Amino acid sequence: MAKVDAAAIAAGTSGVALMENAGGAVADVCARDWRDVRRVLILAGPGNNGGDGFVAARRLAEAGHDVVVALAGDLASLKGDAAEMAERWMGRTVDLVEAPFGWAELVVDALFGAGLSRPLDGRSAAAVRAANDSGRPILAVDVPSGLDGATGRPLGDACVRADATVTFVRLKPGHVLLPGRALCGRVHLADIGAPDSAIAAARPAAMLNRPALWRSSFPEPSIEGHKYSRGHVAVWSGPPLAGGASRLAAASALRAGAGAVTLVGPRPALEHHAAHVTAVMLRELDPRAGWSDFLADRRVNAWVFGPGAGDTEASREALDQGFSSGGCAVLDADVFSIFEDRPEELGAAIEDGGVEAVLTPHEGEFARLMGGRVEKDASKIDRAKAAAALLGATVVLKGPDTVVASPDGRAAVADNAPAYLATAGAGDVLAGIAAGLLAQGMPCFEAAAAAVWLHGEAAKSFGRGLTADDLPYAIPAALRALENGDRS
Ligand SMILES: NC(=O)C1=CN([C@@H]2O[C@H](COP(=O)(O)OP(=O)(O)OC[C@H]3O[C@@H](n4cnc5c(N)ncnc54)[C@H](OP(=O)(O)O)[C@@H]3O)[C@@H](O)[C@H]2O)[C@@H](O)CC1
Ligand SMILES: [K+]
C-alpha cells in the first residue's frame, strides 16, 4: 500500500485527497450501518491512520453527530497529512486516557493501521482493552489496531475486536486470513481515488479465491465427448478398514466431472468398496505388478494417493510407482507421514517423475512434512508459497482460510468455507474434486483453487448438519452456482 500511495501521489492525486476520501468513507459507513447513533468517539493514533480518524470526525460532525476525538500523544507531534487534518478538526479533542467510552454509542478505531510496527503497550494497549470491554460497537479504520495486516495475526496481546472495518483500495491479507478476518468483522472496501496505474505498481501478495480467477480454464463437457475424454481418475485404496477416505475421494472426483473413476487396491478392500459404490469402478491390485500397469494405461489422467492409504511398506511402494508413472496427482494425508520432515525428497520424486502435483495438507500435516523449513511466523500465504516453491508443486494449505499457492508465485485465499465444513472426511472430498478437475485437463493451480471454492459452496448449499458423506451429493449445487455466475 505504501507503493500504491507513492505512485498515486506521483500520478497527481495528493496524499491529503486520499486521506480525505479515506476518512469520508469511514464516516459514510458510520452513517449507513449505525443510522441511529449520535455520539461517536474516535480513537486517533500518531500516524496517518489517526489522520483518517480526524477526517471522519469532521465529516460526522458536519452531518450532525456529537464527536469526541481521543488522541494518543499530543497534537504537536502529528506530521504531514495527519497534522493537516488535525488542524481542520474544530471539535473536542481529549487525551487517549480520558476517552469517554461510557458516553459513546459507537467507537471508531483509528489508532494504528498499516504502520503498526510493534505490539501495543502502555496507554494504547489499555485503550484497546477498554474499547473491547466497553460493549460499544467498534468500527476499525483500515485494520483493527494491533492486527498485522500482512499476516492476519495480532502483533501482541492487545488487539481491537471490531464489528466492522473500512479498508481502502484493496483487501489486505489480514482481512481474509484468520484470526484477522474474525477480528475485522464486516469488511467494507472503499475506493479512495487511487488511479489504476498506481494500483498496478504493486504486485498483490494473493488474490481472493473467486471463479474469476480460474473460470476460463474450468472444464466444459463437450457434446461430442465420451467418458474417457472427460478424464479417468485412479484412486489408491489402502486397507479395508480405512476405505471410507478413498471412497469419498473417488465419489467426489466423479461428481466433479471426471468421466470415469477407479478405486485400485487389494481385494479385501475392494470387497468393502463393492458394498458401497456403483458408478465408481474397482480394480484389483496385481500383487506383483502393483498399480503401475494400471496407471500406465493412457486413459488414466490423474491419480489420488493418501486418503486412507496408511504409512506401510505397500503404501510406500505404491507411491513410488505413482511417481514413476508421471501424470497429474493429488497427494494428501499419509503422503505427509511417509515424507515426514523430508520435503526435498518429495520435491525430487515429483520432479523426477515429471508429476504435475497438487498437495493438500492441513496445518498439522504441513508442519509434519516441512519440519522447521518454513518460518512459522510468516503469513499463511507466505508459508504456502515457500512450500510450493520448495516442492515444485501446487500447495493447498487447508483451513477456514485455505491458501492455494503455485510454484510460480501465485496464491489464492478462500473465504467461502462455512465453519461446519470442518468435519471428518471433508479433506478426502477436496482431494477428489481436485483430481476430477485435473483429469479434465485443468492446470494444477486453477484446479486446486476451483476445488477449494466448489468444496466451500457445496458445504454452504447443504447447510448445517453436513457430514463428509453429504458433500459429494452437494457438489452439483456448487456447480450450478458456478454456472449461474453466483459470486463470480
Ligand atoms: N493508500 C492507502 O492505503 C492510504 C492509507 N491511509 C491511512 O494511513 C495508514 C497508514 O499510516 P502510517 O503509515 O502513518 O501508519 P499508522 O498505522 O498510522 O501508524 C504509524 C504510527 O504509529 C506508530 N506506531 C506503530 N506501532 C506502534 C505501537 N505498537 N505503539 C505505539 N506507536 C506505534 C509509528 O511510530 P514508529 O513505528 O515510527 O515509531 C507511527 O508514528 C493506513 O492504515 C490508512 O489508515 C490513508 O490516509 C490514505 C491512503
Ligand atoms: K485502526
Image (tube, rainbow, N blue to C red):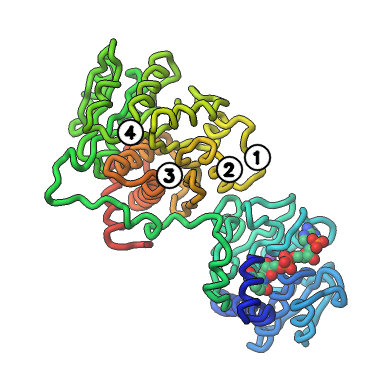
Q: Judge whether 45 appears above or below 15 on screen.
A: above
Residue that label 4 marks: 327
Pointer 1 residue: 375
CA distance for labels 4 and 1: 31 Å
- Indicate which disc, 3 or 4, sits on the residue closer to the N terminus: 4
Marks 3 and 2, how far apart at CA: 23 Å
Disc 3 and disc 1: Cα gap in Å? 28 Å
Toward which corner of the image does residue 307 lie, by quadrant?
Answer: top left
In the rendered image, the quadrant that contains the N terminus is bottom right
Badge 4 amino acid: Gly
Q: CA distance from mark 2 to mark 1?
A: 7 Å
The amino acid marked with disc number 3 is Leu
The residue drawn where x is 54% and y is 34% is 366
Q: Which mark is residue 383?
A: 2
Q: Are marks 2 and 1 in contact (CB under 8 Å)?
A: yes
Task: Tell me the quarter of the picture where residue 465 sits.
Answer: top left
Side of 259 relative to 390 (left or right): left
| Residue at the disc numbered 3 | 421
Marks 3/2 in contact by CB < 8 Å: the verdict is: no
Which residue is painted at 39% across and 17% down in the image? Answer: 317
Q: Amino acid at mark 2?
A: Arg
Judged by depth in the image, the label closer to the viewer, 3 or 1, is 1
Mark 3 residue crowding within 10 angstroms, few (<14) / some (14–19) / many (20+): many
Work out which residue is located at the far top of the displayed protein and give it: 288
